[in-house]
């Protein structure tokens, strides 16, 4: 009898553990584009890894994404861990807005040229001295950069016929040369619906519900006066042992 009770107790603990580990269903974004995303076909999920060059490499000073000055999309993934959730992104000129599904409504506006951001929520706002990571790679262009573009043929991804290219970035006075693979959707004027890292530590960024159209200017408004992240970097005196 004792063995049976012990077995039931262990089974109950295991069930509780598995329930706790189950991923939580994502909440619906606050501001979704009107168009509903098409369900991708199974064959479109994983692009073939064995693509080979189909033409000569072309070197240019124009970053391929710079022509997309006005758009909105739902983005998933990014160049650092922990970004495998959906966020809405909007771009108008040099400004890009990012927002997701969180308990406290929040959005971040990034100046892609100055590479500075402002985070705004219901209680406060914060000026940040860097571009928000969710705006990558739209903040990549910089003075003196050149780009090697190698065509790799075509492939269907998430229902879009895409031109596939590898892009290597050369930056002045920097030895590292980032390399990415872009899947440029022909029906979206070459917008990259999938971006992959071609270096160590592979990652993927995916876009859906892409709309190439002017954005509402009110999306990029933020308070004039905000706290600065520079204040966090100042060293503060240690609290006395008996201080509350």
Image: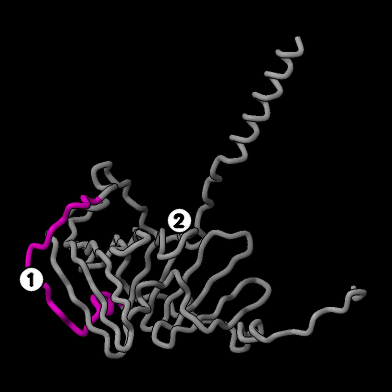
Most frequent secondary structure within the magenta stretch: loop
Q: Going 54% across and 80% down the picture, which residue do you hit?
A: 118
Q: Going 54% across and 44% down the picture, which residue do you hit?
A: 23
> Can you tell which quarter of the image residue 233 is in?
bottom right
Farthest-out residue, right: 242
Residue 133 shown left or right of residue 171 in the figure? right
Residue 206 shown left or right of residue 121 in the figure? left
Q: Is residue 115 magenta?
A: no
Pick the quarter of the image with the C terminus. bottom right
* Secondary structure under the numbered disc 1 in the rendered image: loop
Residue 73 shown left or right of residue 131 in the figure? left
Q: Position of residue 160 (x, y in %)?
A: 22, 55
Pick the quarter of the image with the N terminus. top right
Give the magenta-colored segment's residue range. 47-68
* Secondary structure under the numbered disc 2 in the rendered image: loop
Q: Is residue 51 magenta?
A: yes
Q: Residues within 10 Å of mark 2 (few under 14, many from 20)?
A: some
Please tell me which of labels 1 and 2 falls first in the chain.
Answer: 1
Question: Residue tagged by mark 1?
Answer: 56
Question: Residue tagged by mark 2?
Answer: 84
Q: Position of residue 61 (x, y in %)?
A: 21, 85
> Can you tell which quarter of the image residue 169 is in?
bottom left
> Can you tell which quarter of the image residue 151 is in?
bottom left
Q: CA distance from mark 1 to mark 2?
A: 34 Å
Q: Going 61% across and 82% down the picture, which residue do you hit?
A: 229
Identify which residue, 76 or 239, lies in the foreground.
Answer: 239
């Amino acid at each position: 009898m004792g063995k049976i009770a012990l077995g039931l107790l262990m089974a109950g603990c295991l069930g509780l553990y598995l329930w706790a580990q189950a991923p939580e269903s994502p909440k619906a974004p606050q501001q979704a584009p009107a168009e509903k995303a098409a369900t991708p076909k199974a064959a479109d999920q994983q692009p073939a890894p064995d693509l080979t060059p189909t033409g000569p490499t072309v070197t240019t000073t124009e970053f391929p994404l710079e022509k997309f000055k006005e758009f909105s999309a739902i983005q998933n993934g990014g160049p650092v861990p922990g970004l495998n959730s959906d966020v809405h992104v909007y771009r108008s000129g040099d400004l890009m807005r990012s927002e997701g599904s969180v308990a406290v409504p929040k959005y971040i506006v990034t100046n892609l040229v100055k590479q500075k951001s402002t985070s705004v929520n219901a209680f406060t706002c914060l000026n940040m001295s860097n571009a928000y990571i969710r705006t990558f790679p739209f903040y990549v262009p910089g003075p003196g950069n050149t780009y090697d573009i190698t065509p790799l043929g075509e492939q269907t991804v998430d229902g879009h016929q895409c031109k596939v290219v590898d892009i290597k970035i050369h930056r002045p006075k920097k030895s590292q040369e980032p390399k990415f693979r872009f899947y440029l959707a022909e029906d979206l004027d070459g917008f990259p619906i999938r971006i992959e890292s071609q270096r160590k530590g592979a990652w993927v960024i995916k876009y859906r519900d892409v709309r190439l159209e002017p954005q509402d200017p009110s999306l990029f408004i933020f308070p004039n006066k905000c706290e600065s992240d520079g204040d966090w970097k100042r060293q503060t005196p240690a609290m006395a042992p008996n201080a509350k």
